Image (cartoon, grey):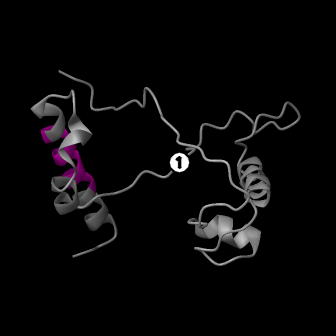
Amino acid sequence: MPSPRWVVLSVLFHMRRATLSRPVGYGQLADVLGVEVGQRIPSAEVRAAVLELRRSKGMVLDDSDRDTYSLGSFFTNPVLSPEQAEQLPAGITAGRTEKFRTDLLRLTREVTKACSQRHKIG
């Protein structure tokens, strides 16, 4: 029986050189920067703020910080509704089996159901 756990094996980042950041999309980051979500500001300021936020959560390697080796998440996972999962582009499962897509949809439904029950949604 396959494991119900998923492991991220690789990540691809597309970087661009720019003086201004992309529009700030995270509320907590916008708060630290003192800007509104959606504003663009100098990239160097965003970098410094991201490092400050991560450092406050023990997510920056620092031998003098005992929280350096936190096992906290480094990214936010999107939560999709079953309808949104059904709309995923066909390429999202490229090279995967139909079972992969079926499992993805099943897990999405289970997470949605569990969240709805926990938060008394719907």
The answer to which of 67 and 101 lies nearer the viewer is 101
The picture quadrant where one finds residue 5 is: top left
Name the residue at the top extreme. Answer: 1
Q: Amino acid at mark 1?
A: Phe
* Residue 71 x/y as whole percent: 60, 37
The secondary structure that most of the magenta stretch takes on is helix
The picture quadrant where one finds residue 99 is: top left
The picture quadrant where one finds residue 96 is: top left
Range of residues picked out in magenta: 102-111
Question: Which residue in the protein does label 1 denote?
Answer: 75
User: Horizontally, is 27 left or right of 100 in the view?
Assistant: right
Q: Quadrant of the N terminus?
A: top left
In the image, is residue 32 above or below residue 56?
below
Q: Residue at point 70% right, 72% down?
A: 31
User: Horizontally, is 114 left or right of 36 in the view?
Assistant: left
Mark 1 packing: few (<14 Cα in 10 Å), some, or many (20+)? few
In the image, is residue 15 above or below residue 49?
above
In the image, is residue 68 above or below residue 57?
above
**Count of marks overlaid on the render:** 1
Mark 1: which secondary structure? loop
